[in-house]
Amino acid sequence: MNAGRVTAKSADDVVIVSYARTAITRAKKGPQRNSGAEVMLLPVLEDVMKKGKVDPKMIEEVCIGNVLQPGAGAINSRIAQLLAGIPDCCPNFTINRQCSSGLQAVAVVANQIKSGQIEIGIGGGVESMSMYNMMGQVDAEKLSDKVFDHDQAQKCLIPMGITSENVAAKYGITREQQDKMAYESHMKAAHANKMGWSQAEITPYKTIVKDKEGEETEVTVDRDDGVRP
C-alpha cells in the first residue's frame, strides 16, 4: 500500500490471508478471568487456519507476542500450537516487546516471508491481565545495587500507573482531555458494536469460569465486555 493506494503487484509481496481474535474482556471480572493463555490462543489459531483455508502442515513458523507471562509465554504458546493441530516440526517462538508484542510478532513473520526464509507463518499475540501483572515479573530483592545507583535503570521499576501520571504532568495533559478522549473512544466502540462490525471479527469459544466458592461454569466468550455505551 502507498498512502491508501494499491501499488503494482510483486513476486515477493507478503499477503495476510486471514485473521482472528477472541473477544476482549475485563481483567479479574470477565469470562476469561480463569482462562490460561493457551485456552485463549487455541480457538484463534484454529479459526485463522480455517478462514485462510491453510493446511496446518504448511505453517512454517508461529510467533506469538506476550508481555506479562514468564518467558514471554513460550510454553503456553507452543502448547496452543500443538493443540491446534500445527505439527511439532513447525518452530515456535515468542516476543516480549512492551507494549506492542503482537504487532511485532506479525512484523517478524512478514519479514521472514519477505526475505524468503519461509512461505507461510502465523503472527499474533495473547495476554491475560487476570493471571499475571507487570510488576510481578521483577523481584527487587534479587537486583544488584547498581540498579538503584543509576537514574535511568532505576526508572525501569516504576509502575505503569505512575509513568502515566508522569507523562500527563510532563506534557500538560489534563484530566478533561483524557476523559474526552475516553468518551469518544467508547462512543466509537459502542457504534461499532451496534453496527455488528466488532462481532463479525470475534471468534467465539467456550471456556470455564469459577466463582468465589470454586464452582465451575461453562460460558461462551463471544463479545467485548468493556464498552460503556
Image (cartoon, rainbow, N blue to C red):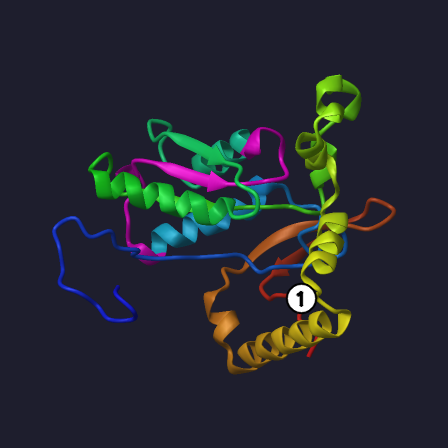
Point out residue 223 in the picture as x, y percentages from the top left corner. 60, 66
Report the residue at 18% width, 65% height from top.
7
Residue 146: quarter of image: top right
Which quarter of the rendered picture does the N terminus lie within? bottom left
Q: Is residue 69 magenta?
A: yes
Above or below, 222 against 55 in this view is below
**Residue at 66% from the left image edge and 52% from the top image edge:** 32
**Residue at 86 percent of width and 48 percent of height:** 212
Q: Is residue 117 left or right of residue 66?
A: left
The question of residue 187 being in magenta is answered with: no
Q: What is the span of residues highlighted in magenta in the rendered image?
A: 51-73
Per the image, label 1 sits on a secondary structure element best described as: loop
Q: Is residue 198 left or right of residue 70?
A: left
Provide residue 128's location: percent of width, then percent of height: 64, 46
- Location of residue 11 with respect to 221 vertically, above or below: above
Q: Position of residue 40 (x, y in %)?
A: 56, 48
Give the residue displayed 48% in from the left and 75% down from the top: 197
User: Label 1: which residue?
Assistant: 225
